[in-house]
Image (cartoon, rainbow, N blue to C red):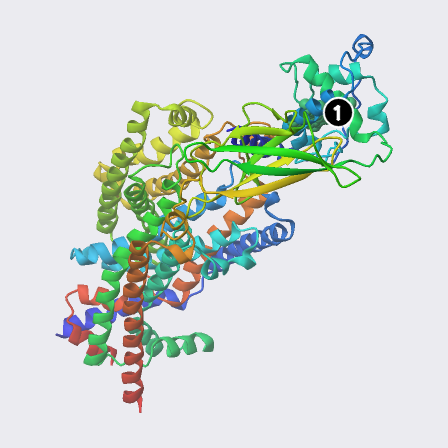
């Protein structure tokens, strides 16, 4: 649901705003003195950055782009310029609450969320010392017992001495593989690993698989300290996809390979009938001429 | 026998006479048309190079004046089938002198319908894609097919009854310029009027007259489906097919009345296009307009009674909103008043009925604009976050010039054709005048 909602919202935003992808720069925009003085109460730590990132990806990325350069689906402000970074967190907070033109007002969002996203946005352009990220792997255990659809992901750190150590408190995301990209599942709550490095979800019912109901489950981590890692596993928990129902069936909205028979017969029948008469009459006209030619001789 | 023979000769001379003189007025007229066409060609060249941004068509009103005019042209072209086919099959002999006029109008109109569609395309060089890659399920593909078929049928139906007339011209117009004589020579197909040739001709005409009917109905029904199959307020209506066909006969009858009046006065054909013809055509216009009024009432009253969200917004715009002045003027001056006036015999005299027909024809065109454009401003999702200019459609000078140009081309086609061919079919009229086929045949020999 969440994914559908987000995709829908993104498409809608795109439709509504893409006309306005004008190439001009935005006019200056200054926050009032008093707003600029407000301090950011949320510390820029891992937790806040992760929350900020999640919020950014859901609510800002479409316009401001993955890296905040203002190169999303529409032209938006670049959040990595020096000029932008020189303003205080308070000023940015005020702008996000106020909004201007295409930039929405986020007054309705909880303040901590906004402060977190500000932390994250600042982090986007921070010249980070290249810290080598650590490596982790994801393992999936599927409870094959009939009835339960439990999936357990286990996150293990690959230490430099080739050891595999369970990692606690790492957020894991679960997906079902689709034609285009992955669909998030079990999004009702965050899933963090326990002391054994494990977290378990119940895979939802009613997801369409392939012709035989086979589905691919994906588990991945996206943690600031670790390189991205994911793994996938096939299960047979999906609904059978009546694939040929959609792809093989003739229908009005299909391409010419799947034209409904009735349409084909009506169209071709009409065309052939009408044109055979036309051609027949053309022959008659030719005959008229042939008779005339003979008489002339 | 001898009197009949004389009659035929007289008819022949009367109807050929106008072809001999190229009047000053005619020459000026042709030049005016050519200037209009050149202006339009210039505007079109500009549009071709700059793109459709030159028009007022934008995201919401992506169909504008061109498509409205296209529908108008298709509508007018249907008259060929009404006069030449419906009336003939119903044995309405009085309409014989009007057949050629209606076929000329049909040909010019359907040619302009095709041209207008191409004009509406940003990349006309891709027009063949509709044949190569068109989706058979799309009404646009059907429309492309029927418009072209109708064009061919109209051409044949104009040409067939012309053959014996061209043979007469070939024999009589010996003083015509060389190219013109050559034209007659070629197009007459060595017509000698033998029994066999007559038999072939009559059979072919019969086939075409019957064939044109289903094609004529499909062309305008399919044109209406271009709108009706969309789930849009003001378009998504089950009666759109018959509604369009009925409206087409109104527009076409009006066009024929106008042409009748012009040719009668310019070519002095009072004996052939008589007051009675105007009277009868006036009645025909009345009849078609009544049918169209009936469809109009259905088309507006039923959704108007329900007044659902989008339909209501759309109808509000037409009845009381911005479009109200043009809507009511079109309905009153283009439909209701003509109907009332045509009830009275004096109003069916040539001049009054000519004036009424002009109003009806303008109304018919305006009605197409009102069908095509306002609906587009009531989409399912509200119009938001778009520039102010996307909220309405006012055609630009480019569009107006090009559209006027297509009118000029249509009129020029007719003008040029009646310069070389008789407006009133000679042998058919002679036949009507109780001459037997044999007599006519003998004399042509």
Disc 1: CA contacts within 10 A as few (<14), some (14-19) or many (>=20): many
| Observer-nearest of A149 and A98 | A149
Q: Percent from the top left, x then y, of residue A150?
A: 50, 32
Evaluate whether residue B243 shows in this view.
Answer: yes
Residue pictured at 45% horizontal, 61% vertical: B131
Is B222 situated above or below A238? below
| Observer-nearest of B148 and A244 | A244
Evaluate whether residue A103 shows in this view.
Answer: no
Residue projecting furthest to the left: B1
Q: Percent from the top left, x then y, of residue B323?
A: 45, 28
| Observer-nearest of A107 and B174 | A107
Residue pictured at 64% horizontal, 37% vertical: A138
| Observer-nearest of B327 and B338 | B327
Left-right relation of B148 to A191: left
Mark 1 lies on a secondary structure that is: helix
Is B423 situated above or below B164? above
Residue pictured at 70% horizontal, 17% vertical: A114
Q: Percent from the top left, x then y, of residue A267?
A: 32, 58
Residue pictured at 17% horizontal, 64% vertical: B433
Residue projecting furthest to the top: A34
Q: Chain of mark 1?
A: A
> Which image quarter holds the C terminus of chain A?
bottom left
Q: Which residue is mark 1?
A: A120
Left-right relation of B118 to B255: right
Q: Percent from the top left, x then y, of residue B253?
A: 30, 48
Is A293 situated above or below B418? below
Residue projecting furthest to the bottom: A297
Q: Quadrant of residue A7?
A: top right
């Amino acid at each position: 649901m969440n994914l559908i909602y987000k995709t829908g919202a993104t498409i809608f935003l795109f439709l509504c705003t893409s006309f306005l992808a004008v190439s001009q720069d935005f006019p200056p925009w200054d926050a009032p003195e008093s707003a600029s003085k407000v301090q950011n109460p949320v510390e820029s730590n891992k937790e806040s950055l992760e929350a900020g990132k999640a919020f950014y990806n859901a609510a800002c990325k479409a316009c401001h782009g993955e890296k905040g350069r203002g190169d999303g689906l529409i032209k938006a402000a670049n959040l990595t310029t020096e000029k932008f970074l020189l303003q205080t967190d308070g000023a940015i907070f005020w702008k996000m609450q106020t909004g201007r033109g295409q930039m929405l007002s986020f007054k309705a969002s909880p303040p901590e969320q906004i402060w977190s996203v500000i932390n994250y946005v600042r982090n986007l352009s921070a010249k980070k010392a290249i810290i080598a990220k650590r490596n982790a792997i994801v393992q999936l255990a599927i409870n094959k017992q009939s009835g339960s659809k439990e999936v357990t992901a286990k996150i293990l750190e690959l230490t430099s001495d080739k050891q595999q150590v369970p990692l606690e408190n790492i957020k894991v995301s679960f997906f079902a593989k689709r034609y285009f990209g992955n669909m998030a599942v079990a999004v009702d709550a965050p899933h963090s690993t326990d002391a054994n490095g494990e977290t378990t979800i119940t895979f939802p019912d009613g997801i369409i698989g392939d012709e035989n109901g086979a589905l691919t489950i994906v588990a991945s981590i996206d943690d600031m300290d670790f390189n991205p890692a994911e793994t996938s596993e096939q299960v047979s928990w999906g609904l059978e996809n009546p694939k040929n129902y959609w792809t093989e069936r003739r229908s009005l909205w299909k391409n010419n390979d799947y034209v409904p028979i009735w349409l084909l017969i009506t169209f071709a029948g009409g065309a052939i009938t009408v044109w055979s008469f036309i051609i027949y009459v053309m022959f008659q006209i030719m005959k008229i001429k042939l008779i005339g030619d003979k008489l002339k001789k | 026998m001898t009197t009949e023979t004389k009659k035929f000769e007289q008819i022949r001379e009367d109807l050929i006479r106008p072809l001999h003189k190229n009047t000053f007025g005619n020459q000026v007229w042709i030049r005016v048309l050519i200037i209009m066409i050149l202006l339009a060609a210039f505007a079109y060249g500009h549009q071709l190079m700059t793109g459709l941004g030159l028009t007022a068509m934008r995201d919401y009103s992506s169909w504008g004046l061109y498509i409205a005019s296209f529908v108008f042209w298709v509508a007018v072209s249907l008259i060929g089938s009404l006069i030449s086919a419906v009336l003939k099959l119903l044995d309405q002999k009085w309409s014989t002198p009007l057949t050629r006029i209606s076929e000329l109008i049909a040909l010019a109109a359907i040619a302009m319908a095709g041209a207008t569609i191409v004009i509406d395309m940003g990349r006309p060089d891709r027009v063949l894609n509709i044949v190569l890659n068109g989706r058979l399920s799309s009404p646009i593909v059907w429309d492309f097919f029927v418009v072209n078929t109708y064009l061919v049928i109209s051409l044949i139906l104009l040409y067939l009854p012309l053959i014996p007339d061209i043979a007469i011209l070939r024999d009589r117009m010996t003083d015509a310029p060389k190219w013109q004589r050559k034209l007659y020579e070629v197009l007459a197909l060595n017509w000698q009027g033998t029994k066999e040739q007559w038999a072939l001709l009559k059979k072919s005409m019969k086939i075409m007259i019957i064939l044109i009917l289903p094609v004529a109905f499909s062309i305008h029904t399919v044109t209406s489906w271009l709108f009706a199959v969309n789930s849009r307020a003001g378009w998504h209506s089950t009666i759109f097919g018959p509604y369009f066909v009925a409206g087409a006969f109104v527009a076409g009858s009006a066009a024929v009345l106008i042409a009748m009046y012009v040719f009668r006065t310019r070519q002095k054909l009072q004996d052939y296009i008589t007051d009675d013809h105007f009277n009868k055509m006036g009645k025909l216009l009345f009849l078609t307009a009544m049918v169209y009024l009936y469809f109009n009432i259905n088309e507006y009253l039923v959704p108007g009674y329900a007044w659902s969200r989008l339909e209501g917004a759309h109808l509000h715009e037409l009845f009381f909103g911005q479009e109200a002045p043009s809507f009511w003027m079109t309905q009153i001056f283009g439909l209701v008043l003509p109907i009332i006036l045509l009830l009275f015999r004096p109003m069916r005299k040539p001049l009054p009925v000519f004036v009424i027909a002009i109003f009806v024809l303008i109304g018919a065109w305006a009605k197409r604009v009102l069908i095509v454009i306002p609906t587009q401003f009531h989409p399912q999702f509200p119009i938001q976050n778009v520039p102010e200019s996307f909220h309405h459609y006012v055609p630009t000078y480019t569009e107006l010039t090009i559209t006027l140009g297509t009118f000029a081309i249509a009129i020029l086609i007719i003008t040029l054709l009646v310069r070389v061919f008789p407006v009133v079919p000679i042998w058919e009229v002679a036949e009507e005048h109780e001459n037997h086929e044999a007599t006519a045949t003998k004399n042509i020999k």
